[in-house]
Amino acid sequence: MTVSPDFQAAQDAWRAARMAKLSAEDGWLNLLGRWVLTPGKTVTIGSAAGSDIKLEVGPDTLGELTLKDGDTATFERDGEVRTLDRKAGGFAWREGRFLLEITALNDIRALRIRDAESAARETPPEIDSFPLDPALRITARWERLPEPITITMDNMSAIPTQVPVTHVARLTFAGHEMALLPTYGSADRPQFVIRDLTSLDDTYPHMRFIFGEDVTEDSVVIDFNRAVNPPCAFTRHAVCPLPPRENLFPVRIEAGERRL
């Protein structure tokens, strides 16, 4: 297996961007927790004993959060009230060193808090990978479904969600015809949640993520060298989707990131 300098350089650049995103202020290494919110209930956030949402660092009282009906909320700190509105894109904000975000999963709303000054950002985990193989960067057929479908996907929190699917990526791997369904992601960067037989011993047991590249009307690049561990591999506070049955493969895909 020969890896050209250009192919290696492209992978190195991708790896650097991957680690930078993982270690960023809004990455997965500094997530302090995820707390389910109840509409109409005010919760106190801070490091003081008795806080509804107890932080290990920061001020005694970071603020008070009230989730309201209609996907709005208020956050009060030192007498100043911030109005939050999901439809207006205002469910994420910053208070000093902390990044706060109200997330939505079906009808469940939860608060995630990240610490921008967390030491975990400075010491990212070592992520081993399989040897780079240019043959595993594959241009797949990108087929639009005759009619969009909706599939039910489970996740690590056992909260089934309905996900619309408009395309399928078809390719051949080790003699097997594969049809990968994209879930989440975007039109120019579709996300594929997969699991293969390496999950038994070499890769994260539940799933890996791959993001499609170079999307055209009828093709998409699937680079298995860029299969990554999901956020759940780095923090127990993430909610990661499990692969749909169409993306479970009875072969070993020895490419991409190995299990931590």
Image (spheres, grey):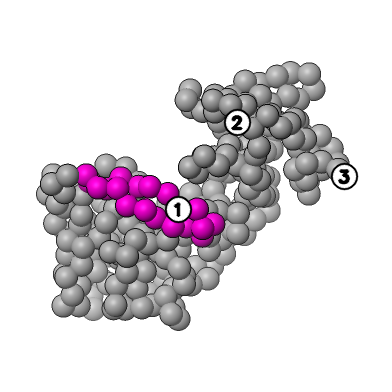
Q: Amino acid at mark 2?
A: Trp
Q: Which residue occupies the extreme top position in the image?
A: 80
Packing grade of label 1 (10 A; few <14, some 14-19, many >=20) is some
Residue denoted by label 3: 49
Q: Which residue occupies the extreme right position in the image?
A: 49
Packing grade of label 2 (10 A; few <14, some 14-19, many >=20) is some
User: In the image, 59: left or right of 86?
Assistant: right
Q: Is residue 103 above or below residue 40?
A: below
Residue in the picture at 53% in, 63% down: 233
Query: Where the N terminus falls, by quadrant?
Result: bottom left
Q: Which mark is residue 93?
A: 2
First along the sequence among labels 3 and 2: 3
Secondary element under disc 3, as helix, strand or loop, is loop
How far is disc 3 from disc 2 in space, using C-alphas? 24 Å
Q: Is residue 157 magenta?
A: yes
Residue denoted by label 1: 160
Q: Are marks 3 and 1 in contact (CB under 8 Å)?
A: no
Q: Are marks 2 and 1 in contact (CB under 8 Å)?
A: no
Residue in the picture at 42% in, 61% down: 242
User: In the image, 118: left or right of 182?
Assistant: right
Residue in the picture at 34% in, 73% down: 196
| x then y, percent, for residue 217 | 13, 44
First along the sequence among labels 3 and 1: 3
Residue in the picture at 60% in, 54% down: 237
Using the rendered image of the protein, determine whether residue 53 is visible from the camera's viewpoint.
yes
Q: Amino acid at mark 1?
A: Pro
Part of the protein shown in magenta: 148-166
Query: Foreground residue, 40 or 226?
Result: 40
User: In the image, 226: left or right of 127?
Assistant: left
| x then y, percent, for residue 127 | 49, 68
